[in-house]
Amino acid sequence: MPESKVLDIIKERFSVRQYKDQPIEDEKLNLILEAARLAPSASNSQPWHFYVVRDKNKIKALGEKMPIGSQVIINSFISQAPIVIVATAGPISILHKVVAFIVNKRWFYLDVAIALEHMVLTAWELGIGSCWIGWFDEKKIKKLIDIPQGEEVVALLTLGYSKEERLPFPKHRKSLEEIVNYR
Ligand SMILES: Cc1cc2nc3c(=O)[nH]c(=O)nc-3n(C[C@H](O)[C@H](O)[C@H](O)COP(=O)(O)O)c2cc1C
């Protein structure tokens, strides 16, 4: 049976929503960012930018900049994370816009997502947990982080050492039979 180190990481990884009050070493952060830098992208356009937020006040504010519900429960854990990455797409080149129009696919979102998942998996291998954040108020975040015009926030990613050691419950996923067809 062939073995896959990447698959082992994929199997183990879970979204971390409780973080220790422990900073992430610069060397590890650089490896995580390097994993994003090396990600593939449509026409190798690399239409991404990553804002590394480490300032505690800004991170606290990020946790409060959710559309609704953050004060109650939704995504308030962001404020605990030692690092939050704000990932943007853009500015989008004319070539990219033309390609997106012709094939009717917004590849730049996918490109940023692939880079983010590279970060997630590399972080996990280095013992660092993360959580994708798709529930955010883009306008407020752009203002807080001072993101230039022409860039669109695709997602946020929290990073930090997990308080939980393993997945608190089994991964809930569809079976291969449900999602794969051979033709
Ligand atoms: C694009 C995207 C957006 C997400 N947004 C949020 C979010 O706003 N808040 C949150 O707690 N988790 C968020 N998640 C994490 C998912 O809830 C999680 O990946 C899913 O439930 C599977 O659990 P697992 O990551 O532990 O395997 C997001 C995941 C993705 C891929």
Image (spheres, grey):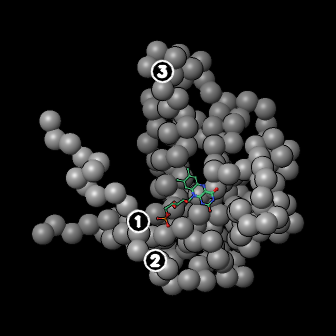
**Crowding at label 3, few (<14), some or many (≥20) Cα neighbours within 10 Å?**
few
Question: Horizontal placement of 167 versus 148: left or right?
Answer: left
Identify the image quadrant of the N terminus.
bottom left
For marks 1 and 3, give the one nearer the viewer.
Answer: 1
In the rendered image of this protein, does residue 97 appear above or below residue 81?
above
Q: Is mark 1 within 8 Å of ligand 1?
A: yes
| Image location (x, y in percent) of residue 46 | 54, 37
Q: CA distance from mark 3 to mark 2?
A: 38 Å
The quarter in which the C terminus is drawn is top left
Indicate which disc residue 169 carries: 2
Q: Amino acid at mark 1?
A: His
Residue of label 1: 172
Q: Compared with residue 158, is residue 113 higher up or lower down, i.e. above or below?
A: above
Tell me residue 34's x, y (percent).
53, 56
Q: Is residue 28 visible?
A: no
Badge 1 vs badge 3, beta-carbon distance below 8 Å: no
Q: Secondary structure at mark 3?
A: loop
Q: How many marks?
A: 3
Q: Residue at x 81, y 41 (%)?
A: 139
- Location of residue 174 (image quadrant): bottom left
Residue under label 3? 104
- Ranked by sequence position, the earlier of labels 1 and 3 is 3
Give, as a three-letter code, the residue at label 2. Answer: Phe
Considering depth in this image, is 42 or 66 the residue closer to the camera?
Answer: 66
Taking the spot 63% from the left edge, 37% from the top edge, the residue there is 89
Q: Is mark 2 within 8 Å of ligand 1?
A: no
Which quarter of the rendered image does ligand 1 occupy?
A: bottom right
